[in-house]
Image (spheres, rainbow, N blue to C red):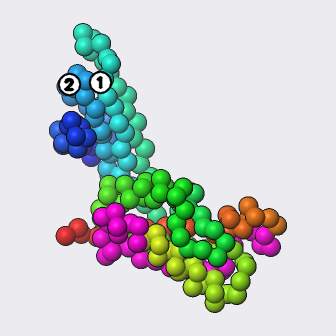
Amino acid sequence: IAILFKKDLEGDLIPIDTFRTDQSASYNFQLENETDYKVLGNAPEYLANEVDLTTRGMDESKDFEVDINIELERIIIEKSITLNNIYYDFDKYDLRDESITELDRLTQLLNQNDNITIQIGSHTDSNGSEPYNKTLSENRAKSVVTFLIENGITSQRLNWFGFGESELLFYPEKNDEEEQLNRRTEFRILSIDYIPE
């Protein structure tokens, strides 16, 4: 299923049309001049994805054809997906400013796929005791969940887990970069049958 949206002057999305497609689908629709659009692709057991298109700056006297390729990723329950650029300072669980872009993308993914529930998992490096790192990683995961809730995702769709130092990518860590990469955050899709209220 694909849904065509038009953006209004405030940037809000107005649904224009819904159409069923297959792998080789084509679909024709009339576009307005100087207008921004979004096409959302969706299929059962796949993550929804979207593409933007615009008629701004195009020659109004000509017809044009747009080839839209929306790739959908199959949902694999409990597959670990590392969030890029969600790193933490040594011994800290505060989100760095550079984490916000990636967390905004995760928020968008959850809004596009309102039937999924996820678990946020965080990891530490090998410095410190195992019990301490377990608590630190739980706090790191909770900080991501708090961000998502503050940005409109219901807590019923979110779970968290602290791995501590149990799944290190590098051991022993040879430098600061390897320690940083061990201090990572991931998410796993737990279910695809959540029913929004």
Amino acid, disc 2: Glu
Picture layout, residue 69 above or below residue 49: above
Residue 64 x %, y %? 31, 18
Residue with the mark numbered 1: 55
Q: Which residues are magenta?
A: 146-173
Q: Left of 17 or right of it: where is 183?
A: right
Crowding around mark 1 (Cα neighbors within 10 Å: few <14, some 14 to 19, many 20+) is some
Q: Nearer the viewer, residue 11 or 46?
A: 11
- Residue 154 is drawn in which quadrant? bottom left
- Residue 153 is drawn in which quadrant? bottom left
What element does badge 1 sit on?
Answer: loop
In the image, what residue occupies the spot 37% across and 33% down?
Answer: 68
Amino acid, disc 1: Thr
Residue 36 x %, y %? 28, 32
Picture layout, residue 122 above or below residue 27: below
CA distance separating discs 2 and 1:
7 Å
Q: Can see residue 21?
A: no
Residue 149 sits inside the magenta stretch: yes
In the image, what residue occupies the spot 23% across and 44% down?
Answer: 12
Residue with the mark numbered 2: 32
Picture layout, residue 159 above or below residue 56: below
Q: Nearer the viewer, residue 194 or 131?
A: 131
Q: Quadrant of the C terminus?
A: bottom left
Q: Residue furthest top?
A: 61
Q: Are marks 2 and 1 in contact (CB under 8 Å)?
A: yes
